[in-house]
Image (cartoon, coloured by chain):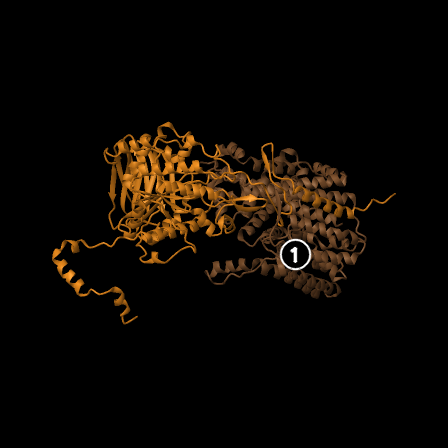
Chain colours: A orange, B brown
Amino acid sequence: MTPEPDYTHRSRTAAVALVAALILLSFVPPQTVGGIRLKRANILSELIRFEEEAVEAEEPLLDAIDEEEFRIDLQQVARLVADTAPREAPATYEWTLDGPAAATTPPAAGQSDTTRRLPQLVPIEDFDTTGRFAAFCRKLQRGDSLVRIAVMGDSFIEGDILTSDLREQLQLRYGGGGAGFAPAASPLTDFRRTIRTTSKGWNSYNVMQRRTTPEALADSYCVSGWVCQPADGASTRWEGTSERACLEQCNTARILFLSRSDSRIEVTVNDTASRIFEIEGSPLMRQIAVRGTVRSLEFSVLSGAGGVVGYGALFESSPGVAVDNYSIRSNNGQAMFRTSPALNAQADRMLGYDLVILQYGLNILQPDLRNYARYGEQIEKMIAYVRHCFPRAAVLVMSVSDRSIKEEDRFVPMASAPFMVEAQRAAAEASGAAFWNTYRAMQSLGGMARFVAEGWAGKDYTHINFAGGRRIAWGLCDAIDDAVRRHPLSVRVAHANIADSARITPLEEALIRSARPVGRNLRNHPER
Amino acid sequence: MTVRAEEHIFGKLCSLLSYDPQQPLIFSSGLFLFLFAGFLLLYGRLRSAATARIVYVILFSLYFYYKSSGIYFLLLVFASVSDFWIARAIFRTEGRGARRWLVLLSVLVNLGMLGYFKYTNFLIGIANDLFGEGFLDFRNIFLPVGISFFVFQSMSYTIDIYRGELRPLDRWGDYLFYLSFFPQLVAGPIVRARDFIPQIRRNPIRITREMFGSGVFLILTGLFKKAVISDYISLNFVDRIFDDPLLYSGFECLTGIYAYALQIYCDFSGYSDMAIGIALLLGFRFPKNFDAPYKSATITEFWRRWHISLSSWLRDYLYISLGGNRKGRVRTYLNLMLTMLLGGLWHGAAVRFILWGGLHGLALALHKLWMRAVPGSKALGHQMRWYWRIPGIFLTFNLVCFGWLMFRAESMQTVGLMLRQIFRHFNAAIAPQLFSGYTGVFLLIGLGYLLHLLPGSCDRRARRFVTGLPLAAQVLLATVVVWVVMQVKSSDIQPFIYFQF
């Protein structure tokens, strides 16, 4: 019997043949087969790169945005807002609690001069032509009233990602407290850590799902993008947390809702004091404003639930800063056009927004698309829409964030992102709105690859998490501090000094007596 | 198209070949393919020169280890020196007490290394929990790759000699060869000295067609399991669910756990298969390490099919050393539980791994009790009737998956959140959307489970088929598999898709 041949050498032959075959395969260019994109399989990718033929700059892809989604008649919006304004003021049901109101966090005086949270400053590009951004900066500095900021965005900030740290830092620096807006019910309430929400008896819908929203609610969406439909007995309890500073209590809580027919609402504060409100039916937005020390708040619909639409509650401390997170997944900004301009305007008259930040674009970004001019046009419409609904608010456009894609077996920044940033900047500039380059801020921290490596972002190399949101929020706070420094308060002269003419003559005399060249004065100063 | 070499190509090549803890040398990397092909060029020529071959393999193995762990390859050398001499001393010593002290010394040296590198910070964390934050400072300790494996291998050698089941080696080089042999060095299987040592000096090396074909088959299937199924579903589905379970419905969380069960199986068994396959190409036979574990109808059967080299090591060197079932019923259960708790700790320095071990220990003890209490109950699926076997497989799989939840979650808080989503926000209605949104992921999951559940005869047939192919066809098959792996590695990331809202 012949012994079985030995195959020891076959391994060597096979390995060499395999390596040779793979090297040859590296020369096969990328292909599209049956609609599937096959990439170049470059076994030598660590040492040799194949530079593909540059793809011609593409025209805006037709399927990148659905313009129908962004259709909005801005003149109609203006008319709706104008029609709303002169009518009766939205009803506010006030309840002032016994006892002292929670003290608001005092502003950290002097810090804004030098303290910076991140090594590199990415400043806000102030294209604002309306004066509202300067007014926002000065109001922040004055610190004598509530400065309210709305951040409208997509899944990038949902669950209070980024805004929780923006709020914390602004409140620590400029005063204030409270977690801002919290919806009456949403599938995301468990994910959000900055306020504890327990709700029962509600069906919640967001404006991106308006096709599945009951018809009776379809026209009830406002800036929050969420509507909550209660059954009789439905209730929501919100409670402050210690997840960030300044959240455990606040001095004002506002519950926003519609009550198209008469309803009975019970509000309980801090699990001790409660009050029943008989709400008169009206198509206008209602608010129950509770003033005092609020640690927890419960809102129950006792009867008349059929006409009630719940939005949520806002927790704030005045004077100081309030930051409201209005995020909806998959939203490129078009969702705001499906909200009711009249309800938005009513909300604004109750709340008074000073700044609206727009954080969109992540869902539009595509690796091969470099022309985002058409999306830029939509951003201009968004800015105009916001200005109609929130006429006193400045608008700040946040650019799209950094995002990585796979190239061979590595992650590299999506090359199209800077083009999107440019389109967003151009739209902000054309509309006279402020602009902040989120992409650059992330790049200055090492980009998305570092965010994922540090555990600051998800493995889709697109979405940040709370830790990543904190870094970006710090960058944005640095930029706001910087803007505040660039818009100093004008020197205010006490009214008494102007009115009291008797003091003018002695003052003039004193100035004349002491008049001497400033430079010489300095040079002659004994300490110099 | 233009071809451009990277700048400073020589420097790049040097850095590629140097120690880099971020880029360990793994079988599924392109670099390993090149190095292994280079290694084989000379290996065949040394098939009849045992000493030269041993030195050659040792040098390659130490380089392989250095590439992932740098200077810590000396640890491997130290372990080989220490246990080589202790083993010889045990063999020469007559007195039972002295022999016991010597084997204890070996165990202490090995477990001391493992304890220092793997568990120091875990123990510091426990001390800080007990005595207050800052009681002890955490240490910056590097964990040398594969230390858990080679330490266990080395202990099997000294313990077998102590038990009189093995004669010590005469040459230290042979022992270093055994301990450092690169195919099983970093992720097992844990090859016993008594199985491996007789193969070291076989001269000349003889590789049969069956060994070569099986080697190719195992490398390719292992590569597919590890680099296609496991890596793809991990990056594109499993990780994101475990990172933020509250963003997903209970249905997604549950599918995430089932997907993780496949991921960890494909990752671990795929790598083991590649190790066994590479060893076969070098003329060494390793025992089977995984045997379709999710076909198990009982938890006892699961541990006979999952990471067999570890479970049998734990049985032979820990459970039996503790007294096994020879010291009464209570001690048997206690020994079982202790073995599994320590087995859990072996997997990772965290409480959740101990709990995972505890869960399996408890399940094994309860199954043992069941077997005792219910006459006619069977331990293995193939002994059961189908109407027992199917529910048994279902129950065992779900129990194992519950264990994987603890194994994979970053913390016990994540475990709680996953369970809360599953039991309070299940929302099975999103299933069609989920499957259509993650088509690629679910196709791979389906394929993975299908291949797993196929009868063993299919595996044997496929192996025979690959073995029977001519060399050119085998190379072509390997090229196709590697090309698929590269396509999957470079494929775009599946974007996050949210269904529950």
- Where does residue B340 sit, x and y in percent of width and height? 60, 51
> Please, what secondary structure does the residue beneath circle 1 have?
helix
The part of the image, by quadrant, that contains residue A23 is top right
Using residue A507 as the reference point, say whether residue B248 is left or right of it: right
- Where does residue B350 sit, x and y in percent of width and height? 54, 53
Q: Is residue A63 visible?
A: yes
- Where does residue A101 sit, x and y in percent of width and height? 26, 50
Which residue is more in the foreground, B224 or B104?
A: B224
Which residue is more in the foreground, A333 or A124?
A: A124
Q: Is residue A251 visible?
A: no
Using residue A361 as the reference point, say whether residue B472 is left or right of it: right
Q: Is residue A302 above or below residue A482?
A: above
For disc 1, the neighbor class at 10 Å (few under 14, some 14 to 19, many from 20) is: many
Quadrant occupied by the N terminus of chain A? top right
Q: Name, please, the residue furthest toward the left.
A: A502
Q: Is residue A368 above or below residue B333?
A: above
Residue at position x 11%, y 57% in the image: A502
Using residue A398 as the reference point, say whether residue B302 is left or right of it: right
- Three-letter code, disc 1: Tyr
What residue sits right under mark 1 in the picture?
A: B65
- Where does residue B76 sit, x and y in percent of width and height? 66, 60
Q: Is residue A344 above or below residue B98?
A: above
